[in-house]
Amino acid sequence: LNEVIQIVNNMIPRINQLSTRDTLFYLDRLGGIFEAKSWAEAESKTGFRAIVEIDASTGGVTKPVARAKTKTQIMQRMVDIAKERVGNKELHAVIVHTNVFEQAERLKEMLLSQCHCDELYVNEAAPATAFHNGEGLISFGFYGSD
């Protein structure tokens, strides 16, 4: 058990988690928006899409990372961020979505064509995830290894 705990503790700082949604409304409504609140408020006026991050690097706080006008632009930015953070290492990743299979598959294709992928999975999120995030969530968790 101690060995498993040590492996998990070593992985936590290496894992990145980025997500984009059709709207930040649900995240804001349930109080999980934290430092991205100003983006949630501006989103309805400007129509942009946002990437937020919540992982060890943010101390578990939702933080805004990037924004763009279209989902395609946002997904490309997610790929760019993964490439920046992983560098030349092998990418291990999972894409989780709420009722946007085609978009999740498009992100997968972008990652496969632009990164050195060792593992890449696509899964549909549980209904409870859709309740908290709305339809249109694409969550992308990843890390790099030699």
Image (cartoon, helix red, strand yellow):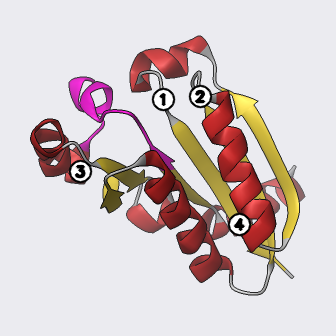
Q: Amino acid at mark 2?
A: Val
Q: Amino acid at mark 4?
A: Tyr
Mark number, residue 100: 2
Comes first in the chain, label 1 or label 3: 3
Q: Badge 4 is on which residue?
A: 143
Q: Give the foreground label among 4 and 2.
A: 2
Q: Position of residue 24 (x, y in %)?
A: 29, 35
Mark number, residue 136: 1
> What span is in magenta?
19-33
Q: Badge 3 is on which residue?
A: 36
Question: Picture quarter containing residue 121?
Answer: top right
Q: Which of 17/4 is in front? A: 17
Are dots 1 and 2 in contact, CB under 8 Å? yes
Q: Amino acid at mark 1?
A: Gly
What whole-number distance in Å separates the C-alpha atoms at marks 4 and 1?
A: 23 Å
Q: Position of residue 111 (x, y in %)?
A: 72, 62
Q: Position of residue 144 (x, y in %)?
A: 75, 73
Q: Secondary structure at mark 3?
A: helix
Question: Picture quarter containing residue 95?
Answer: top right
What whole-number distance in Å separates the C-alpha atoms at marks 1 and 3?
A: 18 Å
Label 3 neighbour load within 10 Å: few <14, some 14-19, many 20+: many
